[in-house]
Image: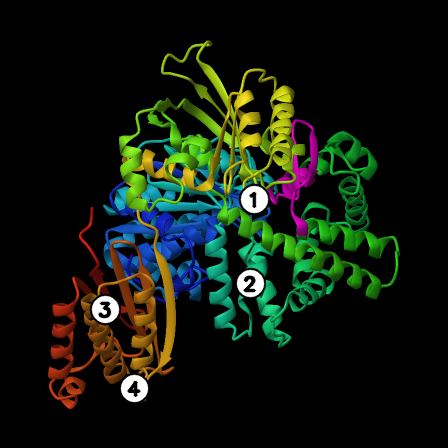
Amino acid sequence: MSTRTAKPLLARKHPDKFVGRDAELDRLYLRAVSDMGSRSIHLSGRPGAGTSELLRQLYDRLFSEQRFLVPFYFSLNAIDRTGYAASVNYLYQFVLQAIAFRRQEPGLIAASPDICELESLSPINDADWVGRLCKACKNDGPLNDERSSIRASLNAPFRAAFAGGFRVLAIVDDLHETAVLEDGRLFLDEIVNIAGRSGTQIMLGSRSSYLMKSVANERIDVERLGTKSVIDLTAVVASDLNIDISEQCRDLIALKFAGRPGLLESYLEAARSKRIALQSYRDVERLYSQELLNGGLGSFFDETFARAASEPILRQKLYEALFHTIGNGNERFKLEILRERLGVHPDLFGRMIDILSVEEVLDVNTGAARVSEDEILRDFLIARHRASADIGSPGMTAAQTITKALKRAPKLVSRDYRREAALGIAGLLLEFEVQQVPRSLLDYRLFRENLKGLSADEARSQIAKEGEQITLPLVAHAAPIVEHLPEFGEPTEPDRAVIAVGFADRSYSDESETVWFAAEIDSKLEADYSLTKEWVDRLDIAADKLGYLQHKIWLIAPEGFSDGALELIAEQGGFGSSRKQAELLREFLHGGSSVKPEAYEYEIVIPIGEETELIAVHAFEEIARKYAFPPKAINQIKTALVEACINAAEHSLSPDGKIKQRFSIDEEKVVITVSNRGIRLTDRTPDRMKAEGDDKRRGWGLDLIRSLMDEVRIESVDDGTQITMVKRIKPSA
């Protein structure tokens, strides 16, 4: 997707700063402009997942990039108080946005002219339908009854589209707010009816925890941003705010606020306003404590609870009740008992629970609930409890909050590193579809005898020749064991211990049903008998608790297993594998016996000038010798690297005066990327090219590079130019 630089209209972020959602945004955009016909889409996501921003970005893109589909975005807000008031606002917003789009004057939306002004601003070919809708907006009250009035308002965009001969896409967001509106159910029922009717294009947005009837043709669950995307977002926001932040603090902050980008940005804004550099975990947690106790983080949760319980005394009783549940193992409690403790009317209590459920403060299920698994929320409840119960001084509360968070920080980061390094056993098991694979890909004893220590090419050849085969099961479902047994969470990360259910063949019979318990365990050397027995026993206990008397165990250790450990696993009818075997198995399932060569990467940054390109050349030469590159290839690559560096130095006007090189090397090729900030090749003006001698030197240099390398790509990136050069060391297999 090309970078968009349009100024945000309804979106809260510049398009270039909207991190991690390009695929979802492109998908929705294509759905809209390719004429969904009568299709409707329902997007749902958890608080902080970015569902609303995704829909706002879609609106802005539709407004700026196309002319034939009139986009309309409406977000429900508790300020409207009633379903009828919301429908009146809905009607006004449609007229406003439609006229702004038809006139191509986005500034009208921010100006919010009154309805009389809007009528006079409409294009003359839209005057009829605009006049009718403006007349409806001017009515002081419902024409007949509230339901009829709400229905008429919500259908107005589609009646206008029919009268005006254009298409309209209605985006109705935050439908979970109907839970707090008086007669909000009327609004929701009519929107749902529209979504189920032919001839309309509509997208609905709500929280995933809000249970609503939906007849939409398609439902899309917007997942929370992945760790890498949150890290990227943290880096972008910190850079925009000019915060001095270290990489380790960036990663910790991203993990602390994973899934809550709004709180993450509030936290970093506090760092900017207080001029706090975030260079250590202590810096991060001290600011966290301040913001939780007396800053934006605490205010966020206070406001959330205030929506559920507006009376301060009731709110304090709610804080106390929830605090004691998390201090008691966070077991589920009956909602009726909580209502009695709070002493509130059932109607008020029902509204309170709806809000706390939608905001994911509570995990509610069939008359019972527990506090959500959110460390920030829990820290907040503990702090509010200490304040209300007058336990210690504010300074003592701050000290305990900081020390607790600091103890948690290294574990949080370490757990993420381990998660990122995990094999992804569940995903691998889901690729099992009754294939026949060489036994050496699962049996470590056979692998150690025949494959361990071989090069990738030799391993490929040996695997292809192997005669002894194993038939894998057909796995229908695979998930972390902890999802079945919550107590199985330690001592491993959830994704490292998995249960897979399926069939031994495609008969799908009771007799062929099979269950695998698989776990990735840690051991610096070959896992010994003691460690292996501990894991075999744990998995057997889990199987017994779940009622799977017949099951197979598959253990994976980084360096495989000792002979004693393998004998124990064999007694269980299971398999013991090394991590390398699991990786080879995945490659085999993806493409037969072919195994992709492992790539090694190196990076170097040099300053422009003073012949520093020679430093890069010497560095590459040392790397090339390490991998025994042919001398001729080394000399050709060195010459091309020098030319690429000279090109970057002479023509970029680099603001930071740096050239970055990355070398990626595998058994078949070396890929060299040379990049620099500054003027891109595509942005160089004819006058500047003339001043540089008609650009002949650059053209000659690039021709030389192309003659020396097998592939050359020159790309203009956001702020500079990148040259990618590929040299094959030997022909690809």
Identify the secondary structure beneath mark 4: loop
Q: Amino acid at mark 2?
A: Glu
Q: Amino acid at mark 3?
A: Ile
Read off the residue under disc 1.
Answer: 177
Q: Which residues are magenta?
A: 351-375
Total tally of numbered discs in the picture: 4
Q: Residue 368 in magenta?
A: yes
Q: CA distance from mark 4 to mark 1?
A: 64 Å
Left or right: 559 in relation to 55: right
Q: Residues within 10 Å of mark 4 (few under 14, many from 20)?
A: few
Q: Is residue 411 above or below residue 646?
A: above
Residue position for label 4: 611
Q: Dot 1: within a 10 Å radius of its alpha carbon, few (fewer than 14), some, or many (20 or more) residues?
A: many
Find numbered disc 1 in the image and state the secondary structure of the residue it sits on: helix
User: Which residue is identified by label 3?
Assistant: 634
Residue tagged by mark 2? 265
| Residue type (three-letter) at the residue carrying disc 1 | Glu
Nearer the N terminus, badge 4 or badge 1?
Answer: 1
Residue nearest the observer in this picture, 130 or 452? 452
| Residue in the foreground of this view, choosing between 288 and 607 | 607
Q: CA distance from mark 3 to mark 1?
A: 65 Å
Disc 4 residue type (three-letter): Glu
**Residue 506 quadrant:** top left
